[in-house]
Amino acid sequence: MKIKIGAGILAFFALVAIFGPLFIGADPAATSDAGLQPPSAEHWLGTTQTGQDVLVQLVYGARVSLGVGVLSAVIATVLAVAVGLVGGYIGGAVDEVLSVLTNIFLVLPALPLIIVLAGYLPQRGVTSVAVVIAVTGWAWGARVLRAQTLSVRRRDFVQAARASGEGPLRIVFFEILPVLLPVIATSFLATVVSAILAEAGLSFLGLADLSTVSWGSMLYFAQNGQALLIGAWWWFIPPGLCIALIGTGLALVNFGIDEIANPRLRTIKVPRKARAS
Amino acid sequence: GCSGGGGGGGAAKSGDAPPLVVHAVDAGTFQEDFNPYHLEGVNFGTSGMIHETLMFFNKLKPGEITPWLALEHKWSDKGKSVTFTLRQNVKWSDGKPFTADDVAFTFDMLKKHPQLNKSALEIEGTEVLAPDKVRIDFAATSYAKLYDIAGNSPIVPKHIWEKEKDPATFTNPKPVGTGPYTLSKFSAQLYELVKNPSYWQPGKPEVPVVRFPAYTANALQTALQQGEVDWAGAFVPDIDKIYVQGKPEQNKYFFPPEGLVTLLPNLTHPVLGKPEVRQAISLAIDREKIVRIAERDYTKVAHPSGVTMPGGEAYVPEEYRDAAYKVDIEKAKELLKGIDPAQLTFELLVPSPYTDWVNAAQLIREDLAKVGITVETRGVAFQDWVSKVGKGDYDLSIRGTPAGPTPYFQLRSLLYGKLAKPVGESSTGNYERWKDEETDKLIAEYAATEDLAEQQKATQGLAKIMIEKLPALPLFYSPSWAQFRTNKYVGWPSEQDPYAMPSPYTSPDAAMVLLRLKPAGT
Amino acid sequence: MRFLARRLGFYLLTAWAAITLNFLIPRLMPGDPVELLVARMKGNVEPAAIDAMRKAFGISDASLWQQYVDYLVNLSHGELGRSITFYPTEVSTVIADSLPWTIGLVGVATLISYLIGTALGVIMAWKRGTWLDGVLPAATFMHAVPYFWVALALVFVFGVTLQWFPVSRAYGLDVTPGFNAEFVQSVLYHAALPAITIVVASMADRILGMRNVMVTTLGEDYVVMAEAKGLTSRRVMWAYAARNAILPNITSFALSLGFVVGGSVLTEIVFSYPGIGSMLLKGVENEDFPLMQGIFLVISLAVLVANFLADLAYVVLDPRTRQESE
Amino acid sequence: MNTAMNDVVLEGRNLTKHFTAARGPRGRFGKRPPVRAVEDVSIALRAGTVTALVGESGCGKSTVARLLAQVYPATSGEVLLNGEPVRAHRGPAFKEYRRQVQLIFQDPFASLNPFHRVRYHLARPLRLHGHARTDAEEREQVAELLERVSLTPVEQFMDKMPHELSGGQRQRVAIARALAVRPVALIADEPVSMLDVSIRLGVLRLLEGLARDNGLALLYITHDIASARYFAEDITVMYAGRLIESGPSEELTQSPRHPYTQLLLESAPDPDRVAPPAGERHGEPPSLIAPPSGCRFHPRCPVALPVCSAEVPGRTELGDGHWTHCWQAEAAVTR
Amino acid sequence: MNVLEVRDLSVDYLSGSGAVHAVSGVSLDLRRGEILGLAGESGSGKSTMANAVARLLRPPATVTSGTVTYRRQDGTAVDVLSLGKNELRAFRWKELAVVFQSAMNSLNPVSTVGAQIDDVLRIHAPGMSRAERTERAVELLQRVGISADRRRSYPHELSGGMRQRAAIAIALALNPEIIIMDEPTTALDVVVQRDILAEIRALREEYGFAVVFITHDLSLLMEISDRIAIMYAGRVVETGTAKALHRAPRHPYTLGLLRSFPRLRGPREELLGIPGTPPDLRTLPPGCAFHPRCAKAMEECSQTLPVLRSEADGEVACLLNDGRGLS
Ligand SMILES: Nc1ncnc2c1ncn2[C@@H]1O[C@H](COP(=O)(O)OP(=O)(O)OP(=O)(O)O)[C@@H](O)[C@H]1O
Ligand SMILES: Nc1ncnc2c1ncn2[C@@H]1O[C@H](COP(=O)(O)OP(=O)(O)OP(=O)(O)O)[C@@H](O)[C@H]1O
Ligand SMILES: [Mg+2]
Ligand SMILES: [Mg+2]
């Protein structure tokens, strides 16, 4: 159920991000003299101060925000899998070094580090922002994956595969990796959320490329234009809401996966009789 | 009514006149720094309100100079020496008399500590000729630097500063100045200036207390909306809704032009180097629309010469005084006929924190698309933009050029060949890299004379080059922000009486404004 | 104590990494603060003055290695250099002025959020299948909302529209800082809204995390046993289930501190709170290396210390680690 | 098979294994004392024969199994395959060793990767060791293996996922996987302890049959001495990392000589027993970090002599391959 | 005579793929002071039943029918399934205590053994002073063979056998009438197991409580129990005294179980085992649930559900046994 709702939300935004711009066609940055129009038949979500259509921006923003989220999550996950699985499986000095590295990145406060790094970024394009977020965000996944690898490595089926003569690469990728897929998926989704949030935070601080329309940059402009102070709620609310919705969708899917792995977590309807005890 | 607002409930010391709550620059907190030669950390008001300059230059009326601590100046040695005759009976706020020693000390200090010498005055030495006469010697002709010497170098008291080992790091926490105010209270969130009772202009100022609460850009908007601030210099996104609130008589604002925002074409670019392309670009851009949408009508379209109007008429050749931009798509297309359309693709670099420029860039993109020029706007980090534009690593960019006491300074910074370094090296002006002998000659002519008419003539030459050769494409004036409320005090600068820059963050102009204010209703 | 010694060693290593990272980042990145400063002054500075300023700001051309050594030596004396933004104020002064605000705000808010979130998580796990499950979707939603968005919404509703709370600053303009009732009251009043933001935005994580661990713990035999022993529900819930469920949450809590601090940077900016977050942004905007470095270092160290405290708490709360350390 | 029945196929000589504990208190100089899991163990597996290794939990049975399978190297002592000492721990020579000696794990729920089908589990070793080169060969041999472990109809089982199988069926797949390699020695580490009583028998019978019919040398590790009596020819009893008694299963169970073996037999639940044994406490099993001196059983031994705590008893041959390490036995023999 | 009477008890686990009938229609008596062994394959519902009696079922388990009656010494009957919150708390542990399978998991890892005994006393005997409680805790621990200074140990500092003893000590704290022991020795090795069994027997002699002893090790039950009940697929298929069951099992499943255990003494009997696998409790075979695995199954077995009928010293639910014994 959770997975369904979550996946529904995600699918919706994914469709919007992929096909929305084709449908809408309009240029999200296109300005007009009709500034600060409240929602109307013409502008479903009103316009910004410079007369840009909020809905159009929202649709294009989905592409950037989701794109940054997914891109940095992909990078972070690849890093996490590499570090976590390799460290966990090989063990020894390599593992020591990798896990100290992981822990360091884990403990260092990410957002300040992102801000500092972004502050220096020569290019603030979508990709570089995604890379910065990924670089600061892979550690959690690596740590979880390492712990899991350590436990899976000791599991009998890995031992059995070793005993029957499988090589280490094959064991890592064919025996261990599939078992860890749910964990990888969870950490991937969690990274998407935090990446989207981080991108929004960066844009909001004006540290991302503001000439690209993203939900974060929309919020930046809304805040800059004092949208709330002048009552332009339609400018301020939708981007934040979309971020929260996507986050909720991802979290729901994640909880769903958790619940499959650990059925105890499921919410249940307690029959009256049992509740009495 | 509402006297004081959130910031005004405090201690008005002298008389009944209420304190004036001022917001000059965005700050979360203040640092205790009242050294007028510090660039950023210094608290606003130090220069002008506490430490005064020798003369006052009104940038809104180029050429209008008011004697201040100095009564007059005299150049000698072909502009390499200047002698000031000082005002008598001026006292430091601790009661000690102000003398030529203080002036000499100030300029000696600048010579000794180059990092304080932000105008890079080439000081050779000073000589006190009499208690009220001092001569300053320079290594080069410095006529054009009179503003920096007399209008932009606050004088500090020798008897206090000479005790400091390193004036560069001295924070001057208990400033002693000749100005109309002294510091009475400092905390990280608020500092307060009170009237200097022994000020040399008796009876002035009439505003007894000036309070400076710390506001960040965001907080200020709310404060303005709630009427907490009497005088602010801020960009307000929707001034009618947030500030004026239907009371244009009381909640006034005045945004006179202060500098020039230009579209910089990189002249080392093979296509942009061609005048007809620049001409076409200029013809295609609808500056009115940019001003309306991106600048919210807070400013005006620039004069094609780049000279600030009104006020700068004398610096523009007769025939061009009424020149104005007009959009002409057809003509632009005509001009571009000879050029391979594939080459008409440029990147427009803007610093992304400057949201109005980001919007302007977007409008330019839309306009140029109409004549077949493809523009890709790229918003980059401020630092990145500074470094890229400085090094000439861009196609098109938008950049502001600061105003000086006369339009010459603006044009010099925009066009002077010596400022342009080769691509790859950081320049400090002339970012488009305009190389033209005639331009440099005109600039040299201005610098070599103290005669106003000569100077105007040279500047007119520069204006003509701007209009005819389009080395850079002026867009609009950058406004000087000033919101002031008349419920407590009246006498603010206005279009009719532009006696000083109205924004509270311009010094020493803000002190001039304070000296002119009178309680409302008197 | 072996466990703690190991952790301490790790934190020292991490601190060193943070310090080195801190040293390297600005030096490996392009940009020049003086140029920037000049650009922001709209070019009112002549080129000749720039070099002198550069020197004054301590921007040096020495070899990277030499600079590193100098940096470490200075650091060991507690010298973080002078801020460029607030020149000539020492970075340590800037931090000393702003850090207490952040620690006060974030510390208290985090504590509140932790206590409430943990309690809610415990109760929600305990009362599974009741209306309390309705909190879950809300928590899930809150977990994904950007901090600054919540902050702005709160500012608008409670600050601007209802005017119940002040929307900026750490204390009223009319109070004198010091240890007097008026000042303390003003500080609390001003901290209310930002604190609520941090609590609201970070609590969801606590709730969800605690609930999940708690649900798992509830299935453990010792909880069933405690119930069978006829203990009161309160005792089973807190002394048996929650007490154990908190353990894995301590570490995740400590790690999440980094995120809370990150989020509070945004909160501070929205509320113009004079904390370290606002200063960090200022430093970044002005490419103020010394300030950024100093602040990032302090934040990192603070998070490290918090993590170490969490480890201590863990040792106190979990007898199993204690034995190991005998 | 080139080994005749009853030839020693796999042998461990004086195997000793000390683990450095990953956690635990440090001693002086910050060194952690080792876990002396296995001390001086010699054991031989013969073709076509089931040998049982019996002992209580934690006494080191699995460690012996892993040493024999060369999952990790011994601290000292050596392993001999067909009389040749095993030296290689990687490379082709080691792969060859892997091909000859296979391990079956205790928990059939953990020893199959939940993500792979039965076919994959069986086909991989076939391919790895070059027994099957084409798909057809592979299919044929997988079917044959399934048949050997009585998972029929073969077609149906081939494409099942592990979670679709019952415990007994999984253990059969695990055995088939070990057989796929065509080993000469098979080490089964408590292969049925996780299975239900009613299903155990089938699996044990299968193993017994494999040893008997295919001449495999089988080491059956268990803590259930009764089942060892039924399924193994020889039983070796282990206590706290050391061997204490060994002999033909019937003789060992009916006339045990070591006090621990006696205690073990006495303690095993037995409905046929007339009266339950006297309720005296025997104390807890010893720590392997600081094992008791001398005979490791002496603190729990009802008949301990002073010498027991001083010296490790030597091996006393009792005839018919029955031997024990006990001072009492030694005394009895010499007397 | 009976201290506990279970009548027609059914428990379902509700789940997405249909209800699991873990216990269906079980009726069982526990006599005062006896040890009742409950045997059966894994998943046959033994723990579920025990938990139902102790009211420890958690969702998604639900009692769908049946009653559980507890009889006090004075003869008053208590309907266990409808006890209120406070009555239930008093019933649990004063009247009925539980020892779980793995003591490592049933002791709170973060508090000392002494504290966990103290916990019980504080709640149920509020009149006791702190010193009295400590004294009692020491006494209990010594009674099960743990020295007094171990009171301050945490569970992880004790060996498996000691933990199990500590769990038993906690169960004894209030002198309950009934102790349910769910596989209390499965995790231990035989020597330690033997000690604990001896302990339980001795304590039973001393205090006279009744024990429900759950395990799947039938030979163990034969030794320790007075009476034994065999469960298969959620139903009791046979009950009887340990002796009788050992001598002449009446249900084919009991026979199969008995003949699955290798014997240590005497001649090597042939082991029979039970072919096939236990059924899926969601879709039980019709009729006798055991018939697909039963060597003696008849046509009728797949249609008629056999009921538990009383016989001399025991009951059996098998169509074969209607009136006759199992040959
Ligand atoms: N990798 C290891 N590191 C440290 N100690 C170990 C390791 N493997 C086993 N041991 C220790 O060695 C001893 C013997 O372990 P082993 O697994 O061989 O016993 P076992 O007889 O198989 O027990 P069980 O019946 O529980 O399987 C135990 O005390 C165990 O804790
Ligand atoms: N939470 C649950 N949800 C669904 N089914 C369950 C749950 N708990 C137990 N079951 C099922 O109920 C049946 C009876 O379980 P129970 O634990 O009572 O068996 P048992 O006889 O105690 O087995 P064991 O000997 O393995 O302890 C099993 O088939 C089991 O799969
Ligand atoms: Mg083992
Ligand atoms: Mg059970």
Image (tube, coloured by chain):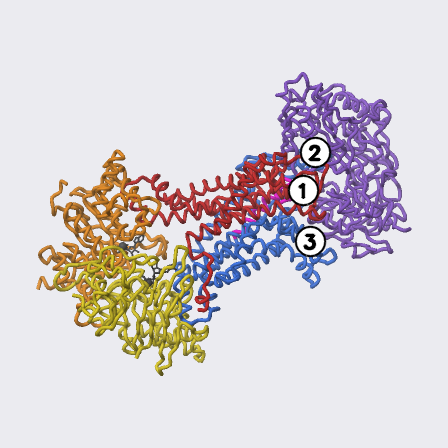
Magenta residue span? C281-304
Three-letter code, disc 3 = Val
Residue at the far right: name it.
Answer: B522
Q: Is residue B182 above or below residue E289?
A: above
- Residue E120 included in the magenta stretch of the image: no
- Observer-side mark, 3 or 1, equals 1
Chain E drawing hue: yellow
Q: Residues within 10 Å of mark 3 (few under 14, many from 20)?
A: many
Q: Which quadrant of the figure contains the C terminus of chain D?
A: bottom left
Is disc 1 placed on a helix, strand or loop?
loop
Q: Position of residue A112 (x, y in %)?
A: 57, 46
Q: Are marks 2 and 1 in contact (CB under 8 Å)?
A: no
- Front-lying residue, B23 or B143: B23
Magenta stretch: helix, strand or loop mostly: helix
Q: Residues within 10 Å of mark 2 (few under 14, many from 20)?
A: many
User: What mark, if any, has residue A41 been given in the picture?
Assistant: 1
Q: Which quadrant of the figure contains the N terminus of chain D?
A: top left
- Observer-side mark, 3 or 2, equals 2
- Residue C303 included in the magenta stretch of the image: yes
Q: Is residue B174 above or below residue B437?
A: below
Three-letter code, disc 1 = Ala
Whether residue B145 sits left or right of residue D45 in the image: it is right
Q: Which chain is orange?
A: D
Name the chain letter of the residue that bears numbered label 1: A
